[in-house]
Amino acid sequence: MIWRNLKDRLMLVIAAVLALVLVVPLGGMVWLVISHALPALNFQLFTEVTVGTGGGLANAIVGTFYLVGLGLLIAAPLGIAAGVFLGEIAPASRFSAVVRFTTDVLAGVPSIVIGYFGYVTMVLGLGWGFSTLAGAIALALIGIPYVVRSTEIALSKVPRGMREASMALGAPMTTTVWRVSLRSAAPGILTGVLLALSLAIGETAPLLYTAGWSSYMPSLALTHSPIGYLTYAVWTFINEPFATANALAYAAGFLLLLFIVVVNIVARRLIKRATVG
């Protein structure tokens, strides 16, 4: 009994130390970004576009929402549909095995390779030029594998008895999938969509090849229209020999961190509400 208590306390101490190892660097990174971003956090940051290495980040903020939102609109339906096919329709078919293998390979492809693929196929091949649609599709290709796998895993955890009960009551396959399986798996699916969203927010390399950069506010044109985004400001302005440019880079990093925190908080509440309901 004494030995068991000692082991429990030892594991508790080890867990606390490992948690500190994670929390301390994260806290230091957040403090570094916030402290350097403070000089640029003003009303001008949100109302003015970028001018050279100064000005504001209104164009990059709106552009980030455009790119990530459109990319998610592409990735979420396709990923969920593929996950439903793998988890509900034909989980053991040969085609499903091919889809799983392709999904795993796509998840491991470096983002810069996806960006170069987008550059060759969409920017040059289709003649779209640097554009919102090309950038959004590149982000969607990065996020789709995570939505697919999370959907399949979430569906696999739905009790088989729930499906059988639904079909025993006369519900067709589509109704069972929509009202029973997907509703029960919603928290896990939402987690995958959240992961895809977080990855899309932080990507730079694929957008350099597909979205380009623009200091103007984004237009509604999907092609032949470069667009600004926050990660470009971080990647570019941090290397400039000007204090104002460096402050803008840190401000962009702070906004990205804030966006991810807000998305996580909202998603957790939605997951908790779905689980309780």
Image (cartoon, rainbow, N blue to C red):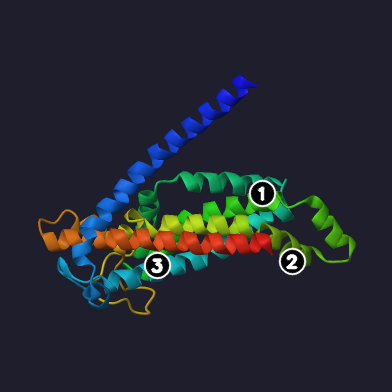
Residue 57 on image: x %, y %: 25, 70
- Of tags 3 and 1, the one toward the viewer is 3
Q: Is residue 205 left or right of residue 183?
A: left
Question: Is residue 231 visible to us here?
Answer: no
Q: Quadrant of the C terminus?
A: bottom right
User: Dot 3 corresponds to which residue?
Assistant: 67
Please tell me whether mark 2 sits on a helix, a strand or a loop.
helix
User: How far is disc 2 from disc 3 in space, using C-alphas?
Assistant: 31 Å
Question: Is residue 95 visible to us here?
Answer: yes
How crowded is the residue under tag 2: few (<14 C-alpha within 10 Å), some, or many (20+)? few
**First of labels 3, 1 by sequence position:** 3
Please tell me whether mark 3 sits on a helix, a strand or a loop.
helix
**First of labels 2, 3 by sequence position:** 3
Looking at the image, which residue is at 69% across and 45% down? Answer: 94
- Of tags 2 and 3, the one toward the viewer is 2
Q: In this view, which residue lies farthest toward the top?
A: 3
Residue 44 on image: x %, y %: 22, 75
Q: Indicate the amino acid at tag 2.
A: Arg
Q: Are dots 1 and 2 in contact, CB under 8 Å?
A: no
Task: Report the front residue among 52 and 109.
Answer: 52
Specify the label residue 179 is tagged with.
Answer: 2
Please tell me whether mark 1 sits on a helix, a strand or a loop.
helix
Specify the label residue 23 is tagged with.
Answer: none
User: Dot 1 corresponds to which residue?
Assistant: 95
Compared to residue 221, the image places residue 105 above or below, namely: above
User: How far is disc 1 from disc 2 in space, using C-alphas?
Assistant: 26 Å
Task: Report the front residue among 14 and 85.
Answer: 14
User: How far is disc 3 from disc 1 in space, using C-alphas?
Assistant: 31 Å
Q: Indicate the amino acid at tag 1.
A: Phe
How crowded is the residue under tag 3: few (<14 C-alpha within 10 Å), some, or many (20+)? many
